[in-house]
Image (cartoon, helix red, strand yellow):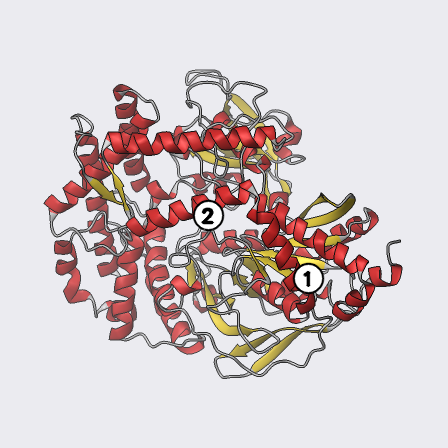
Amino acid sequence: MKKQMLMVALACAMSAHVVTAQPEKAAAAATAAQPATQLKASVAQTQAALWASRVFARYHYKATPLDDAMSAKIYDAYFKSLDSEKLYFTQADLDGFAPMRLKLDDAINNEDLAFPFQIYGVYQQRFADRMTYARQLLKGKFDFTSDETLQIDREKAPWAKNEDEARDLWRKRVKNDWLRLKLAGKDDKSIRDTLDKRYEGYLNRLKKLNNEDVFQMFMNAYATAIEPHTNYLGPRSAENFDIAMRLSLDGIGAVLQSRDDYTVIREVVPGGPADKSGKLKVGDRIVGVAQGNGPFTDVMGWRIDDVVQLIRGERDSTVRLDVLPADAGQDGKHATVAVVRKKITMEEQSAKKQIIEVKDNGVKRRIGIISLPTFYQDFEARRKGDKDFKSATRDVQRILGELKKEKVDNVLIDLRNNGGGSLIEAVELTGLFIDKGPVVQQRTAEGRVEVESDTNPGLAWDGPMGVMINRGSASASEIFAAAIQDYGRGIVIGEPSFGKGTVQTLVNLDKFSQSDKMKYGELKMTIAQFFRINGGTTQLRGVTPDIKLPVTADAENFGESSYDNALPWVQIKPAVYLPSGDLKELVAPLQKRHDARVGSDKDFQDIEDDIAEALKLRKDNVISLNETVRRKERDKQEAKAKAREARLASDGQAPKDDAAAGPGAKEPRGKVPDATKPSKPGKSAVALKGVPRTDDGLQGDERSLSAELAAEKAAKNAKDVYLQEAAHILADEAGMLKADTRMASRTMPYLSMVKQGEN
């Protein structure tokens, strides 16, 4: 069976561990390596590059020959992937490399990748130079009374002309790092220690990248220079991509994270082997790993993905861990814990439900919410005939059955930030809401159009429904939302979606290898373009919601339209299909009620104020390095946050679970306590989901693990204003349909509620 993946590529280098370990912070690990050692490409890598170039030139949807023009694009993309903010290289460096700009095609064809690795070698040294200089600056003092400013986004800025300009840029960056911590209440010694450790950490991460990392960055520069959603996956990344699709792996059931030189247990998966052992807990540090009864391997200072690779293994095999307990000091007593590996299902990424009750003129409406983070499927289990294979559609179908029993009035499929997944799942999930018919069209590079259809008769849910999307909804999410919209089956609510209308397939380069020991990796390659059944495409323009909520994403920097080489929007003949209904009659009155409701809603006003501030900051693209100016800005933000907290608390909108709003929260807004002080028990986090928090100047791994986890809990419990409003919209719809059966029969002739009335 042909694998067809629809995953939005938000970065060239993907995390090597989806759930079993937390990725190292991007700011530190962005593109670092060991300055003292010149890395070199292996024979397998040079051969993999050659075979990839042949596949790209012949089989890609946008087949592009590897010539001088392509070399120039790869060259530019490679430098952008290494130094997108132009913080490390200088223009003098670029001038020195310029003669090779049109020779990367020759390097690949001749199986000689010395030049791209040479570029990386210079990058290594520049990175080390910048960190060394940054640490030297910490020994002096900064003048926070001057009117200096720092450019926030340097992607479109010119390169520093020389070392003097580069150093001045870094002086301002370090000054800003210091000022952020100072405004958060830290003293000079604490600031100096924090930043020195931070920059040292950057250098340590620099030392951990190897030639596989460098090769993957170079090959991704090549792949994305052709088209944004084409990627190269090294052998390890290919394995983890497969894990992300099937939402399962064989391991111990623990989420891991790097902190200092330790591998720390960040989460224990309920019901997994680690949990059942009763001997592992959050905060424990893994310092050694042994296979079965074999010797321990010391993993202190290792990359997190290397540790994960050791801990994963064959199902029912034993791994032994040398553990320093969370409550033990560095010289504390170690414990040896043996765990038998089992199949771990990553439930956090599975479909989940909740019910939101909405009161309208004394009538209570129950709205069933199904959140779907990704379109997952265990392809291998399905191929083998496993009746219990993991599938997004199967999970949603089960939840719909539960919601029927709970007598909900309407169902909302929440696809916000769902970047896609399996095409099969997108088609089959649509089939739960339509009887039979086409769902999406595909056009190959040769112009051949294929129609993917739902062939299963009947509906799993025949009541009204809606789909919620945002800018992060891409690919399979857009196929589903577009099909529901084209069939007139449900109301689409939210922001315009990402705009990824291309289909990728996985090409295993290992089949070109003449040795089992030579692993070439895989290509995730664009081979076709998607089209809606109405003939349009989701490419570039995405899906436009029927009822729009305030746009929070930056369309210039996020989404298909932000790519210079995205495929254009085009149109083909519509497929032959019979709409389920026509919701146009419903949209105008729903929009009117929505506008009236949010017009007087304080939460929406807060969000729109924050959006306006963010847009202004993005447009200005500078922040002041004057302490007085920044302190006034901070005081204003804190006053606003306190006023919001007070209002939310008085409105009874505090979350049900008590969770202190500690530092590290990704979404809630509020005053952040000092990370060194314990959170006061019993204080509820009062926050709005998606609203930025007060800046504490720290990075994730600089906060205590307990504070970080508490903040994530607070973020999870924060009020989701957009979701609440979407529930109100669907409650309005349910009420309108029940109140006017004639309108219901015109707009949704299949509805069970029309037949049942108010029963």
Task: State yes or no: discs 2 and 1 in contact (Cβ < 8 Å).
Answer: no
Where does residue 572 sit, x and y in percent of width and height? 54, 82
Is 326 situated left or right of 44 in this image?
Answer: right
**Secondary structure of the residue carrying numbered label 1:** helix
Q: Residues within 10 Å of mark 2 (few under 14, many from 20)?
A: many
Measuring 39% from the left and 62% from the top, which residue is drawn there? Answer: 562
Residue 200 visible in the displayed image: no
- On the picture, is 197 further left or further right than 511? left
Q: Is residue 687 above or below residue 66?
A: above
Q: Quadrant of residue 750?
A: bottom right
Whole-percent x and y of residue 705? 48, 27
**Number of callouts:** 2
Q: Which mark is residue 16?
A: 2
On screen, residue 199 above or below 551:
above
Q: Residue at x 29, y 33 (%)?
A: 630
221 or 517: nearer the eye?
A: 221
Looking at the picture, does residue 136 appear above or below residue 505? Answer: above
Q: Earlier in the sequence, mark 2 or mark 1?
A: 2
Q: Is residue 71 left or right of residue 29?
A: left
Of tags 2 and 1, the one toward the viewer is 1
Q: CA distance from mark 2 to mark 1?
A: 28 Å
Q: Nearer the viewer, residue 23 or 381?
A: 23
Q: Position of residue 199 (x, y in %)?
A: 27, 34
Camera sees residue 67: yes
Specify the quadrant of the image occupied by residue 589.
bottom right
**Position of residue 752 measured from the top left corner of the image (x, y, whole percent):** 83, 61
| Residue type indicated by callout 2 | Ala
Circle 1 crowding by C-alpha within 10 Å: few under 14, some 14–19, many from 20? many
Q: Which mark is residue 429?
A: 1
